[in-house]
Image (cartoon, helix red, strand yellow):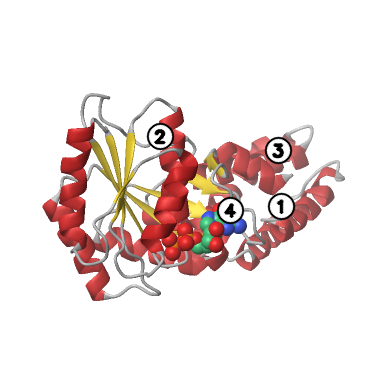
Amino acid sequence: MAFESLADKLQNVFKNLRGKGRLTEADVKTALKEVKMALLEADVSFKVVKQFISSVQERAVGQDVLTSLTPGQMVIKIVNEELVKLMGSETTEIALKPQNEITVIMMIGLQGAGKTTTTAKLAGKFKAKGRNPLLAACDIYRPAAIKQLQVNGEKVGVPVFSMGENNSPVNIAKAAVEHAKKEGCNLVFLDTAGRLQIDEAMMEELVQIKEAVHVDQTILVVDAMTGQDAVNVAGSFNDKIGVDGVILTKLDGDTRGGAALSIRSVTGRPILYVGMGEKLSDLEQFYPDRMASRILG
Ligand code: GDP
């Protein structure tokens, strides 16, 4: 289960706080030190942890807490509120154009992050909401990518536009948008190529696609299991390509949770959805408050 260790540790800290009738400033300090350790061990980035603790501390050592009837509860409430704030407070929806116009969404990410699977999941979700999506197979490098998209597209009932492997991703993207116009599709997902790591050629190709077609939303898919690497990857993609939102996959796994807690604060970009499994229905909208409750138990 994701966040298990972090949740356990925080719950322990809070158990101690709850048991105390009155809190001294030293009690709060000790508790926050433990919260800090727990967050660092969960692979939350150091800068984010530092800021987080100082925000909580500022509020927690104020008179409100020290004179409050249940000071322990008050500290827990503050930690909860600050966690929600850290993850962006509000749920962010993907901005779509009106139904009579075509919205183009470019899906990007490193190989293995779950991009192709997530693209099909997302297309299925929007189809269920009454959109008419089209999946475009722009990953011409990974041998099974086109086939995988076709199989997944069929499962979610969304057509796939492909020109095989012998055409450039830029041409495929342009032709896909034309195809969407002809077929009356109003939501095009460009499934772009991933690489094992960020490289210049990959970035250049994404820039070229963005120059050739009007991309309305660029969505980055990152693997939560990779912790701070996921956050670094998000930072690089955002700097070089521009990212509108992030989808965090594999949150059903044994992730320590650092990526979920750091991405928003480090990149300034919201988490839109989280992947909760391999099935095409396993994609959930991201609610910062629900995530915080999960972490705090
Ligand atoms: P891509 O290379 O980024 O396109 O990655 P794929 O879509 O091929 O996914 C890589 C692997 O991760 C596949 O085995 C997927 O089934 C798996 N995967 C994707 N999303 C999730 C998720 O949210 N949870 C789990 N457990 N597995 C996932």
Measuring from the top left, give residue 276's x and y in whole percent: 60, 49
Name the mark nearer the viewer: 4 or 2: 4
Q: Is there CB contact under 8 Å for labels 4 and 1?
A: no
In the picture, residue 171 is in which quadrant?
A: bottom left
Q: Given the image, on which type of amino acid does mark 3 rest?
A: Met
Separation of residues labelled 4 and 2 (CA atoms): 22 Å
Looking at the image, tell me whether mark 4 or mark 1 is earlier in sequence order: 1
Measuring from the top left, give residue 93's x and y in whole percent: 40, 34
Separation of residues labelled 2 and 1 (CA atoms): 37 Å
Residue, disc 3: 74
Query: Counting other residues with Cα less than 10 Å from the Cα at mark 1, is it few (<14), some (14-19), or many (20 or more)?
Result: many
Q: Given the image, on which type of amino acid does mark 4 rest?
A: Glu
Residue, disc 2: 93
Measuring from the top left, give residue 151's x and y in whole percent: 45, 52
Q: Nearer the viewer, residue 228 or 19?
A: 228
Query: Counting other residues with Cα less than 10 Å from the Cα at mark 4, is it few (<14), some (14-19), or many (20 or more)?
Result: some
Q: Is mark 4 within 8 Å of ligand 1?
A: yes
Q: Which mark is residue 278?
A: 4
Q: Is there CB contact under 8 Å for labels 4 and 2?
A: no
Q: Given the image, on which type of amino acid does mark 1 rest?
A: Val
Q: Which mark is residue 1?
A: none
Name the mark nearer the viewer: 2 or 1: 2
Name the mark nearer the viewer: 4 or 3: 4
Per the image, label 1 sits on a secondary structure element best described as helix
Separation of residues labelled 3 and 1 (CA atoms): 11 Å
Q: Is mark 1 within 8 Å of ligand 1?
A: no
Looking at the image, tell me whether mark 2 or mark 1 is earlier in sequence order: 1
